[in-house]
Amino acid sequence: MSCSSEDARFAVQQVPNERWRQATAANLAADHLNGYDLWTMAFLEGRQDWEETRDFLLSASRDELTELVEKSRGESLAFLVMMMTGACNADCPICFTDRRRKRGETTVEQRDRLLREAAGLGAGYVYVPGEGEPTIDRGWWQFLETCKDTGLEAIVFTNGLIFSDTATSEKYWGCQPEEAIERLADYPVSFYVKMWSTQPELVGKMLGINPDKYQFTDYDGVRVPLGMARLLDRFPRQRLGIEVVVEGRNADEVVDTVVPFAERHDLSRIVEIIQHNGRTLGNPTYDPTPAQVARATPLLSPTSCTVATCKAVVTSRGYLSPRIAILETQLPASARHIDEGSLWDLLHGTDYLVQRRYEQSCLCESEPVSLAEAGTPTLIGPQSVVPPQLADLIDPMRPTATATANDFTSTSTVADLLGGRVEHGSVVRVVGRALPVGPGLVQLADGPDTVSASGVDVGAYSWVGVEGTWDGLLGALRATDTTIIKESMRQPIGRAVSEFAMVRQPEMLRAVIDRSALTSLLRNRLAERGYLEVSTPMLTVNGDMGHVSQAQTEPVLGRRFHLRTDPEEYLKRYLTAGLPAVFEVSTNVRADKPGDWHLVEFQSVEYYRRLMTLDESIEVADELVREGLRGFGPPITSWSGVVLHPERPFNRMRYADAFQSVLGVDLSAEECATAKGLAATLRTVGCEIEVPEELVGWRRAWLEAAFDGHVLPKIRQPLWITHFPAELAVQARLDQADPRYALRAELYLPGGLELANVYENLVDGAELRAQYNTRRSHRVAAGMSYVATNEALMTSAEAGMPPMSGGAVGIDRVLMVALGHASAGGGVLFGREGFTELKSEHSVCGSDGGCGSCGGGCS
């Protein structure tokens, strides 16, 4: 998508090329000084107009760099992006936020300090796009006072309702709209007011606001909100603009009416094609047609991507973000808060900020970007900077190669020698990695197997081909000739890359092999039962309605997708399509901090069968888990000090019975039927639990808190907990014999480790929709983002989704228990790479295996 060569934004936003270079040079020097030279050099590579800067950074002493940084830090920031509040009085379907004020939003004092620091670093303006509606923030007027005091221009995006609706203006500003506009004229603030349509009814639909509140009126022959008319008459035109999102319903009107209106009245403008978020995510019905896009393209606004090298972005709760269009949940677990240090130190000492600073891409990455230089756009991006050590910097005309020997032919493997398949005294040729033991003595490693070899004098950890005589009595190989296949140029020391640990300790590879075998076993057992293996998408249009943090992609063909947390909803649709039984070994992603029992990216096997009952489904999962434990665990398998006895089916207990056994609380009692009554009963029996204030009215919250905190830790045997309370049904059918409980079951080990879950699934379309609505309400009440209903699933259910049951088994957890490991991921070589943040003094980029890109870059 191309942008207009005409930049109709506010003048302060049109950062001159000279100013951009000045700020970018200051940041390059600071980042280079702090050890981020991979990224600074990558940015400068191939830019002839930056050769002088590049040469200086490479040749300057540390004192010279320090002097430059101190001299130029006051010009390092072009602008600050600051979100104010998550609260909003509109409900735009395209919005990625949930309209709620968040706990921990920045205070007036925090913002005041932030604004002053930004001004001290050279920022010319503060850009307030808003996670919510900025004008209803409690600290609005103090924000403007600070801007006025520091000389910062405020660029604020608003839905404009507060200028039209007297009740809204009096509620948040304590005055009439006309009085507020007069007062605002004295502050350095400019407004982009949403003007998505001139049709009241369409405005109401697009913004989720009762259009009557806008009190539309005629202005210069165009229907506009009363607030816009007031601003046009009373507010300085040079500080008034419109913001427009172009979609199918308004595209023609934007071109024919809205933009011409703005041009006639000298209004600045930002015009963008719809970027799918919120309830529009994955819904192409909102998209303009190709013809509409072609008409709107000349009006689209230039982007600010290039200014990423000299901007700072702060969320409404005070966390630093590398870009504007990134949800707070998408930030690293170690996201930095403005209270952790000065803005300067945070911007130049935080890995994820520096590493993303020199990438010129964003939500609009399909659009070129411009800088205001003599009125002519300079197309700079978008592009992603790759650290030089990953880039192909070799002269393409000069072929290069690394010397290796691949003509060595082996006659036996290390496993053959250890397995008694080679006679004593035989001459053999074996390939392996030489693990150092002593002079001329190595352990020859091939996979997880190692054997002693004497007479091998090569560099440590090199791949070698050894010819020699096998001594079956000593279990050793006496070498007569050695061929170096690939010499190791670096010792596998530290955690720079995940495979180093297994290079040093090959036996660790056994878990990788066991994991492969376990996965094959589960596949075979389900296939033997008549289940067909199928595949479901990793990229999902709809978000997960559960209480899980879901990862999102960068835009793919103009649309963001979710990474699936499980394949359940797609697998059930296979049964609607007509298959009787299906399963999938799926890779799933949950964006929760990794722990001993949790990997961000993990595998499970999930299955569903038509007309299967809950009890039958439990039997399937139970047998899969027990066979996995028997097949890969020791003769006596234990967990948390308890012998598991996988040779017999695991016991079962109803949720209510477990609750009463541990806490002495009868969930069927009348006084426990409500959240208030259950909370009081729990307090009576001495069960001290805390439930977030916004969830105290939800019985589900009290059940989960009590069960997870008090019941699960008391489990001392493998136990299926069945018949969860109806509030915890998720997508399970209610028990017709007692609708207070749902046909849901989970398998727990001592200590509360969950290995499997099973449901008799809810397949009635109306009931499923009602369950979704309830789950969403609880999710939003818990402070999580709004998730749209999966309409494809609802349609599938309405079309005749058959009665079914199914379940899921966690492959990584089953293997963890079988092998006696304390944490999951032993069979996944790279399961935790990119999620550690271990500093190394020799690391070029400041992390040791933490970024997942360069593997630490440590020397």
Image (cartoon, rainbow, N blue to C red):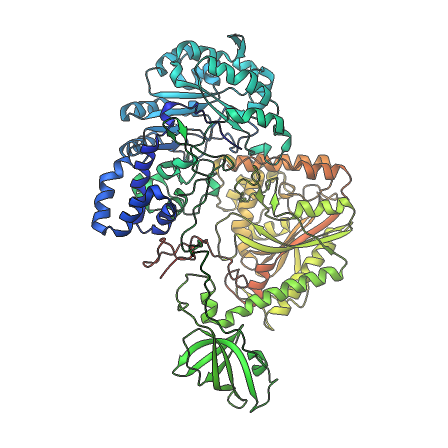
Q: Nearer the viewer, residue 702 or 471?
A: 471
Q: Position of residue 170 (x, y in %)?
A: 43, 15
The residue positioned 52% from the left and 14% from the top of the image is 214
Measured as percent of width and height from the top left, residue 352 is found at 40, 46
At 55% from the left and 82% from the top, the residue drawn is 429
Q: Along the horizontal axis of the image, is 617 left or right of 85?
A: right
* Residue 659 rendering spot, x and y as whole percentages: 59, 49
State which quadrant residue 277 falls in: top right
Q: Is residue 245 left or right of residue 577?
A: left
Image coords of residue 295 (percent x, y):
57, 24
The relative height of residue 470 versus residue 579 in the rendered view (above or below) is below
346 displayed left or right of 758: left
Nearer the observer, 84 or 756: 84
Residue 155's place in the image compared with 346, above or below, is above
Q: Is residue 216 visible?
A: no
Quarter of the figure that contains the C terminus: bottom left
